[in-house]
Amino acid sequence: MGTDFRDSHLALLRSKGVDLQGLQRVPGLTFRWGGKYGYDLNQRETLFTELNVFEQFKPTLPECYRDTPFLFLGNIDPDLQGFVLDQLRAPVIVAGDTMNFWIEGKRESLMSVVSRLDVLMLNDSEARLLTGEPNLVRAARQVLSRGPKSVVIKKGEHGAMMLLPEGCFFAPHFPWNWWWIPPAPADTFAGGFMGYLAGCDVVGEAELRRAVMYGSVVASFSVEDLGVRRLAALTREEVEGRAMEFGKMTILDLPRGREIPLETT
């Protein structure tokens, strides 16, 4: 982070139990991205990307981080993503994110990292840009052929799709009670996804499916207020409560007597 990052934000992270041993503050401005959303909230236009302190950043992990079993490589230079991954000894699950800036500017380096991932997360436009394939299922399968064990395509208000070699899983979005649509849901989805997996003793297809659901649930809270206000006040009980609502919303088989009468004319 740069010197413009507020101490009050650090205090918030500490209050939530976030380990900040690896955080570096250097002279300059923090990374900035600006974009514009139109009527279709699943589409965005990038207006600017300012690397700022990221441009010279070379993350060196503290020794206590190197045995972590779960790693999420956030949306940064793929050379740095690979550099971070090289420092871990034996991760169980490695997931990664990217964006059009790196797909267009550092494709070769990005694909080298992609080949080492267990999970790659993309949105619709990024999947199409990366593969040149308009069909999302074919795009995901093309990515799978490059090494990842699964591909998650985030579809905003239309949910999320996960492709595995054995098949496909789709989770609808939770009916958001939103009034604001920042770019935060995609990052929050990743946090919910990885957070769920980190609490599992083993990780198989069933756990990955539930992780997609938890990602969607946690992301649904982020659009209920501006910035991180809603997330800052969020409790585990609220997350689990909404997860139960999600389960009821998506269940296929109902007990007898619950049929909805259909009227014919």
Image: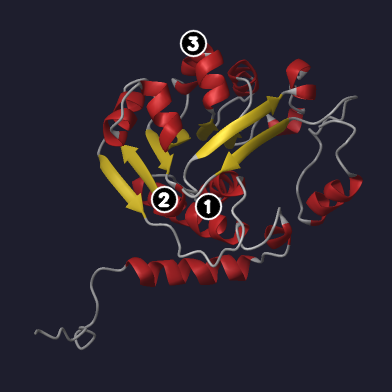
Residue under label 2, please give it. Answer: 207
The amino acid type found where label 2 is placed reads: Glu
Label disc, if present, on residue 108 of the rendered structure:
3
Identify the image quadrant of residue 83: top right
Label 2: element kind: helix
Pick whichever, 113 or 262, lies toward us.
262
Q: Is residue 148 visible?
A: no
* SS type, badge 1: helix
Question: How are the colours assigned in the image?
Answer: secondary structure
Percent across and percent down for residue 176 are: 51, 64
In the image, taking residue 248 as reference, residue 31 lies left or right, namely right
Cα–Cα span, label 2 and label 1: 8 Å
* Type of amino acid under label 3: Glu
Which corner quadrant of the image does residue 164 belong to? top left
Q: CA distance from mark 2 to mark 3?
A: 31 Å
Instruction: Give percent across and percent down for residue 47.
Output: 63, 31
- Using the rendered image of the protein, determine whether residue 43 is visible from the camera's viewpoint: yes
Q: Are marks 2 and 1 in contact (CB under 8 Å)?
A: yes
Q: Residue furthest front?
A: 39
Could you tell me which residue is drawn at 68 percent across and 62 percent down?
230
Kind of residue indicated by mark 1:
Tyr
**Observer-nearest residue: 241 or 136?**
136
Mark 1, residues whose alpha carbon is within 10 Å: few (<14), some, or many (≥20)? Answer: some
Toward the left, the furthest residue is: 265
Residue 196 marker: 1
| Residue 127, position as x, y percentages in the image | 40, 30
**Above or below, comparing residue 45 to residue 255 in the picture:** above
